[in-house]
Image (tube, rainbow, N blue to C red):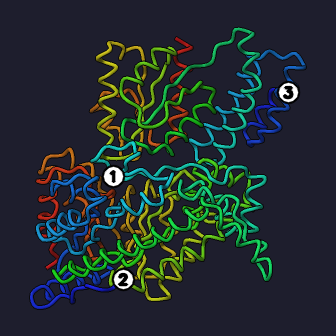
Amino acid sequence: MSWEQNIPDGPAGEAKTAYDARLKRVNDAIDLKEPDRVPCIPFYSTFPYRWAGYSMADVMYDVSKAQDAIRKYVTHFEPDMTMGYSSVCVGQGRFLDKLDPTWLEWAGRKTGKLGDDSMCQFIEFPILEDEETEYPAFNSDMSGWIINKYLPKAFNSMKALENLSFKNCLGWGSLSFAMQFLNPEVMKAFQTLSEAGQLAAKFYGEVAAFNAELEALGFPLVMKATTVAAFDTFSNNLRGTILSLQDIIAEPDEMKKAIEQFYPGSLYGALAQAKYSNGRFVYIPMHKGMDGFMSDAQYREFYWDTLKRLIMALIDMGHTPWIYTEGKYDSRLKYLTELPRGKVWIHFEDVDMKEAKRLVGANACISGGIQAELLRTATTDKVRDEVKRNMDICAPGGGYIFDFGESMDDCKPENVETLFDTVKTYGKYR
Amino acid sequence: MLEQISRTVQIGNAKLVKELVKQALEDGLSPADIMNDGLIAAMAVVGDDFKNNRIFVPEMLVASRAMSQGLKILEPHLVAAGVKPIGTVVIGTVKQDLHDIGKNLVATMMRGVGATVCDLGVDVPDEIFVKKAEEIDADIVAISALLTTTMPAIGDVIKAFETAAVRDKYKIMIGGAPVNSNFAKTVGADYYSPNAAEAAELVREILSGMQVH
């Protein structure tokens, strides 16, 4: 079955007019021009599902419920862009069950720890543990290490790959090489990968069809691809935060080699996704680059170097990176000014937005800097005031998209109504 | 020798710190002096350097690791000499929150300033925080939440201490990405820390204050 079938036609009539107006609004902001009003694209993670009355366990396993929630959300609140339902692992329950990862917990997992209403949670632990032996092994044979070490520890279903070897498979070696696949556990692991592949294709097919439906309703898609900085890929998945930060001092050369090995994947993975999407941005969530985690010199050497290359390569190939900073980022603003004018969207979770507007906003479209926690706890008046305050700082002159610093989860619906209403009225440029 | 231990902790050379602590013990220096004037003195310098942006988390972590390794050698000698640890912290993430990156970083750095840390792990029920703090006679309870959806559970943990009528026995500090000082006031926490290094520094200050008084 092709994942490309059953894709509805693009928007037409009134929906097309609305689609074009929304896209132009966003494009103007990226081009650092003043649109007709501030684009409103709050990043939702679990809010639409909660608001529509579904649990996270429901939407992890039943995409019709996830689709219903997002359809209701976009048609009711009318954001300027949509991210569909595929963020925070929604719709991936069966795929995840099949591979049985050790690094993730999600609502509805039969053996899991989370309640039905929790969003999925990443469990970080070091897989590359012994720096003295495993760094050289990883850096001299990345693929072999991933098959023998990473996969068995990252997925319960892949434990049998621990002893699999491809080193003697050349020529007549293939005879003894093939014997490894008689092991029932190895056979099962490969069968599981094949079945997981079919579930992934089904997931992508359903996402593509639903995204096209959202476009037909008049809502452009935010994301065309997602990728992660090479340092984050390495730190999140192989070494863990504490050890990777220690390695900056204790194992700098080996770690740099390892990070460098993940750089090509961070680029080509994004390009592969982008080929099949109508989305506008390549989303780059950034996890470990925040203030204090590293000095200026360490950030430039271990984090920014590969990240900047990734951003520049994406721009050179005609894509627009959505650089989604997480945590405090005040000391990193100067790095972001190194990017070419009008080519990126930079999001801030926690930063002095006046400085961000002055330094980064002169060169790039910005968003964020206002706490999503307001939506859970504040009165509607407070939400209105804070949204206005944020727009007063960031909106003048254009180059601004409204979003909260964090994603929307547990929110009072009346506060979400207020935020959209305030951005759409107070955020008018003309 | 104590100065050399302190300098070696500051640069994070864990292997050498272990050797130097062994040597200091062999030379007849008192375990309390090695701990206070060698290891803890080093972390006071490191804490000050961090506060003033002269060093960052990587340097803090390697120094903490070196301090912990030295302390491990020293511990049996401290017990034998009747020297008590500078204080005890119970730490964990709230129920339904499985994110422990920040909590682990905080625990590592708290150990680095010489505190004994009892790490309850993740997804900790409210009553377990209370039970463990009572059981080990802790000084500080540190509660972490990463998600906006789980941070209200911090308030539940504090309420559990109130319900058990033991709230006043402990200093309660909280942290995590969505947590801020206003939230700390709302839920009745004593302290909020925006990052791991400041949390460790706070623990050092609280515990040294306790010793003074």
Mark sitting earlier along the chain (1/2): 2
Which residue is the site of mark 2?
A1
The answer to which of B95 and A18 lies nearer the viewer is: B95
Residue at 50 percent of width and 88 percent of height: A316
Q: Quadrant of the C terminus of chain A?
A: bottom left
Which residue is the site of mark 1?
A119
Q: Which kind of residue does numbered mark 1 sit on? A: Met
Dot 1: element: loop
Q: Which kind of residue does numbered mark 3 sit on? A: Met
Q: The disc numbered 2 marks a residue on which chain?
A: A
On residue A63, which mark appears? Answer: none
Q: Quadrant of the N terminus of chain A?
A: bottom left
Dot 3: element: loop
Query: Local crowd at mark 3 within 10 Å, few (<14), some, or many (≥20)?
Result: some
CB atoms of marks 1 and 3 within 8 Å: no
State how far apart marks 2 and 3 are (Cα). 73 Å
Which residue is the site of mark 3?
B1
